[in-house]
Image: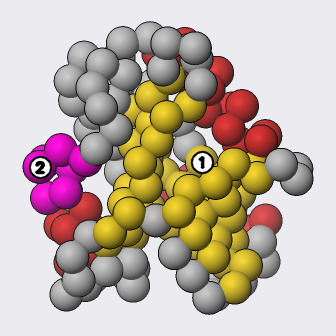
Amino acid sequence: MQVLLPNKIASKLIRALRKAGHQEIGGILMGECLETDCFRIVDLTIQQQGGAFASFIRSISSTVVPLKRFFQRTNHEYQRFNYLGEWHSHPSFCTEPSVRDIHTMWEMLDDPTVGANFLVLLIVRLNATETLESTLTVFVPQQTPFQAEFKLENAE
């Protein structure tokens, strides 16, 4: 699987990470299916509260309005535009998912109200040169989680 990150979204993410400093932040990822197993992140939410030095808890209520707006903007074309998964930062740690991160993603994937065939988990941080470091893990029912190719997309 390949996931593309447009420069505009990357810049938004970098600004939020700078502002948050050593506090973990996160949100949800909304994307576009470009072809089988190739997606572009077209929007993300940034939840500044709910994070601490070594944890982040996403507020479910903070996702409802942004998702509704996203689906309205994309004319409810769910096969092309949809919720991809979650993102959060690990500003003081590596970008590998923690045991808790993995457990949370499995819980979400198993939740019938989420209605997902797969979920991605993007973990990000800024390195010493303020360049974005990331790991993108894909969760699919009855499969071992795997790393996806995550690329910065030059086109806006």
* Picture residue at 59% right of the left edge, 64% below the top: 3
Q: Residues within 10 Å of mark 2 (few under 14, many from 20)?
A: few
- Picture quadrant of residue 68: bottom right
Residue 59 drawn at (x, y percent): 34, 43
Q: Number of marks in the image?
A: 2
Q: Report the magenta stretch's main SS.
A: helix
Identify the residue at horizontal 18%, vertical 44% (top origin): 98
**Above or below for 51 versus 78:** above
State the residue position of label 2.
Answer: 99
- Give the mark toward the camera: 1 or 2: 2
The residue positioned 36% from the left and 12% from the top of the image is 22
Amino acid at pointer 2: Val
Image x and y of residue 12, in percent: 68, 32
Q: Is residue 26 left or right of residue 33?
A: left
Report if residue 52 lies within the magenta region. Answer: no
Q: Amino acid at mark 1?
A: Leu
Q: Secondary structure at mark 2?
A: helix
Q: What label does residue 85 carry, if any?
A: none
The residue to which callout 1 is attached is: 44
Whether residue 50 is visible: no
Contact check, label 1 and label 2, Cβ < 8 Å: no
